[in-house]
Amino acid sequence: MLQLNQYGGNAERVDQAFKEPARSQRIQRPLPNTVLSQTDTDLKLFDALSSFKIYTNQVSMHLADGWRHRIFALLDDLYEPDSWDTDDKVTEMPAFKTFMKVILELQPTRLPGIGISSAGSLVAAWYLGEDRLTIICDADDKVQFILSASVDGDLESANVKTKASRISESLGPFRPERWLAV
């Protein structure tokens, strides 16, 4: 850790700190047509995670206070290389953009759980008792939501495909605040 003294004279130490490598060694990109190894998977995860965080920063002015950090924490957990199965598909940026559009459209106060489908879609899920809302985010603004909710003691369910730009209208009749609000 860089220690600064209170009387100045630290320019050389600051310069040296920026020249030193980060905590981990720099990862070299694989050559084209190479077989993916665990290290290559780590690189793909790192690239996806950093791209998602950069995009989140670009739209963060539209997020409620603290949401950027909360989304970062969810992404860090999801893209943890030590718990990643190398056969799983990494989500691509268009699906992540759709996820962020859903978050911006719905403005939830409760953070969803997130996951990745076998096709690489980003999946957001909210649970409240027996009531469930799952939103699958794909490229090109495409979303599918699956929900189940108890209404007067009966279980109702729905499976709807729509656009992220219409998610609020499509969810409206199902009282989405039960999942999305604190």
Image (tube, rainbow, N blue to C red):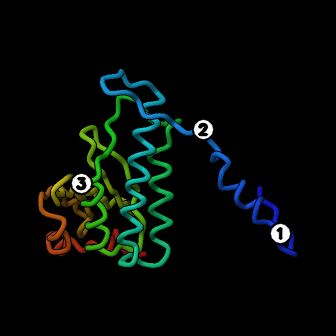
Q: Amino acid at mark 2?
A: Gln
In this rendering, which labeled residue sits more in front, label 1 or label 3? 1
- Residue 54, given in percent of the width and then of the height, sits at 41, 61
Q: CA distance from mark 1 to mark 2?
A: 29 Å
Farthest residue toward the top?
35
Q: Which badge, 1 or 2, comes first in the chain's sequence?
A: 1
Question: Amino acid type of disc 1?
Answer: Gly
Inter-mark Cα distance, 2 to 3: 29 Å
| Residue occupied by mark 2 | 25
Q: Position of residue 136 (x, y in %)?
A: 24, 53
Label 1 sits on residue: 9
- Pick the residue in front: 57 or 111: 57
Please tell me whether mark 1 or mark 2 is closer to you in this view: 1
Residue at the spot x=40%, y=39% of the render? Answer: 44
| Horizontal side of residue 55 vs 26, given as left or right | left
**Mark 2 and 3 residues: CB-CB less than 8 Å, in contact?**
no
Vertical comparison of 21 with 141: above or below: above
* Secondary structure type for disc 2: loop
The alpha-carbon separation of the residues under discs 1 and 3 comes to 48 Å
Answer with mark 2 or mark 3, whichever residue precedes in sequence: 2
Residue at 50 percent across and 73 percent down: it is: 66
Mark 3 residue type: Pro
Front disc: 2 or 3: 2
Q: Residue 116, percent across and down? A: 33, 45
Q: Which mark is residue 94?
A: 3
Q: Please state which of residues 106 and 138 is positioned toward the viewer in this rendering.
A: 138
